[in-house]
């Protein structure tokens, strides 16, 4: 699956918005949860373009948030155990987001294909076919 330039632009926008949101929340949050807003950006990019699009967001987002919100601020220092453990936890959580996001995309694509096969099948039947929900409301009627 090729990722379009539009998806890269949307991923960059999601990343920038996540960092800006964390920056706006910084007076309230201080040093706590420095990476929390990145998870939404990662999930959005997985949905938009898959794991290949999400991986750069994960690393650039971490670098930006580490620089801006993790002590010592305004430098990237992963020499301390706390920062190393935090990085591993962040990468683990992002990995889970990617796995579940990819699984959701596969399930969505399969459901879409099944709906299309069902729709084509019903359109090709010469007799009248009507589908309803449990309340008797018509969902589909062929020509």
Image: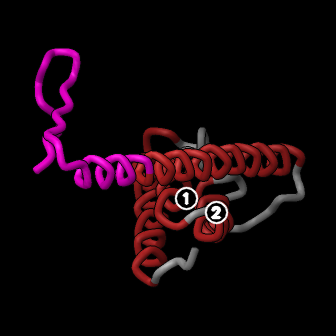
In front of the other: 98 or 63: 98
Instruction: State the image coordinates of residue 2 (x, y, percent, origin top left).
Output: 55, 79
Q: Count residues near mark 2 (Cα–Cα under 10 Å), then give few for <14, some for 14-19, many for 20+.
A: many
In the image, 51: left or right of 19?
Answer: right
**For the residues bearing labels 1 and 2, Cβ distance under 8 angstroms:** yes
Residue 94 within the segment the image draws in magenta: no
Q: Residue at x 81, y 48 (%)?
A: 88
In the image, 41: left or right of 1?
Answer: left
Color theme of the render = secondary structure
Q: Identify the image quadrant of residue 129.
A: top left
**Can you name the residue that lies furthest to the top here?**
135
| Residue 74 visible at all | no
Q: Residue at x 48, y 77 (%)?
A: 8
In front of the other: 21 or 142: 142
According to the picture, the residue beneath numbered tag 2 turns out to be: 51
According to the picture, the residue beneath numbered tag 1 turns out to be: 46
Which range of residues does the magenta coloring cover? Answer: 114-143
Can you tell which mark lies on residue 142?
none
Depicted 34 relative to depicted 137: above or below = below
Element under disc 1: helix
The disc, 1 or 2, on the residue closer to the chain's N-terminal end is 1
Q: Residue at x 53, y 45 (%)?
A: 107
Depicted 20 relative to depicted 119: above or below = below
Depicted 128 relative to depicted 120: above or below = above
Instruction: State the image coordinates of residue 56 (x, y, percent, origin top left).
Output: 64, 71
């Amino acid at each position: 699956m090729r990722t379009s330039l539009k998806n890269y632009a949307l991923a960059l926008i999601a990343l920038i918005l996540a960092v800006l949101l964390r920056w706006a929340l910084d007076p309230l949050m201080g040093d706590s949860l420095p990476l929390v807003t990145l998870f939404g950006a990662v999930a959005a990019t997985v949905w938009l373009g898959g794991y290949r699009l999400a991986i750069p967001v994960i690393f650039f987002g971490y670098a930006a948030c580490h620089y801006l919100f993790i002590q010592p601020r305004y430098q990237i220092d992963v020499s301390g155990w706390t920062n190393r453990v935090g990085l591993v936890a962040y990468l683990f959580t992002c990995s889970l987001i990617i796995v579940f996001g990819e699984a959701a995309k596969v399930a969505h694509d399969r459901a879409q294909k099944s709906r299309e096969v069902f729709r084509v099948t019903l359109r090709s039947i010469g007799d009248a076919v009507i589908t309803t929900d449990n309340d008797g409301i018509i969902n589909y009627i062929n020509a």
